[in-house]
Amino acid sequence: MRVLNFGSLNIDYVYQVDHFVQPGETMSSLSLQVNCGGKGLNQSVALSRAGVETWHAGCIGPEGIFLKDRLQAAGVDVTFVRQVEGSTGHAIIQVDPTGQNSILLHGGANGQVTESFVDEVLKGFSPGDVVLLQNEISCVGYIMDRAAELGMSIALNAAPANEKLAGLPLEKLDWLLVNEVEGAFLAGTEDPEGIARVLTERYPRTMLVLTLGVQGSLAAKGDRRVRMPARTVKAVDTTAAGDTFTGYFLRGVLEGRSLEEALGFAAAASALAVTRVGAADAIPAYDEAMAFYRG
Ligand code: RIB
């Protein structure tokens, strides 16, 4: 089974800070790293490291060629990574001493995904293939409509949560992955059980996966609920924790593991990712994640 990830590619400017900069404050950072990122790119790296045959489709500007090289080095097929005019998407990321982050995005080339590009890419895929999406590129709704017509399975990591997300045809999803903020945005309630109830009633054919940080995760469909505790680690940078979780969870369900196993494997992989600085570079390889899961 193949996974097409139609998603963002960003240059991440990661600043270590004492605290997140406040309104009106001018503050010096402690250090700067320039990393490969974007929820799309990170999730393709996670899928590929987890052992899934992965295609990435998306747009970069000329200065973002190294992002395509990075994906290719991770074993991702980059035939559909297109260079366009204009700047590559980027993110300004502050990381505080507890590992928490604060992210400011500039979409750049990620906003240049067009319907004709989508049609061209989808020609290469068939019923039974999976398309993975996040909410950082243009045409997400169009991709969902066309992929559903083609008979592909559709997974959405609904990040970031904004007005565009609310307008998407989420009833077409096979898997909807949200964190507590995105879940509350969609469901209109902050309580995890309430989020699960509202979204499973609204999207009865969709498997909902709600990640809750140190509280673990919850999968829900119909009346079924599966809960998984988080793994306890010392976090140094939580960037890409959700991206790692998404890639490893999909690997688990696509290879036919139980929900409990898929959630546990994803929790182990994302726990390892937060012990390292960076986004794509922090994502563990399959063997390491499996050893930690079993250990
Ligand atoms: O999920 C982490 C990612 O969000 C970062 O790599 C950044 O680029 C933003 O897309």
Image (cartoon, grey):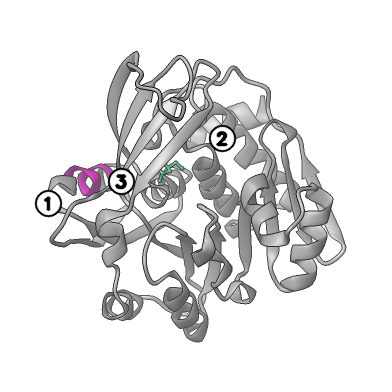
Which kind of residue does numbered mark 1 sit on? Pro
Q: Quadrant of residue 7?
A: bottom left
Would you say the beta carbon of the disc 3 residue lies within 8 angstroms of ligand 1? yes
Q: Is residue 27 left or right of residue 83?
A: right
Q: Is residue 194 left or right of residue 145?
A: right
| Secondary structure at numbered mark 2 | helix
**Which residue is most to the front?**
24
Residue matched to label 3 = 10
> What is the distance, in whole Å, between disc 3 and disc 2 at their CAs?
20 Å
Query: What residue does disc 1 label?
Result: 62
Where residue 29 sits: x, y (%)? 34, 17
Q: Would you name the residue on which mark 2 appears?
A: 270
Identify the mark nearer the N-term, 1 or 3.
Answer: 3
Q: Residue at x 49, y 81 (%)?
A: 145
As displayed, is residue 54 above or below residue 180?
below
| Measured Cα–Cα span from mark 2 to mark 1 | 31 Å
Label 2 with label 1: CB-CB less than 8 Å:
no
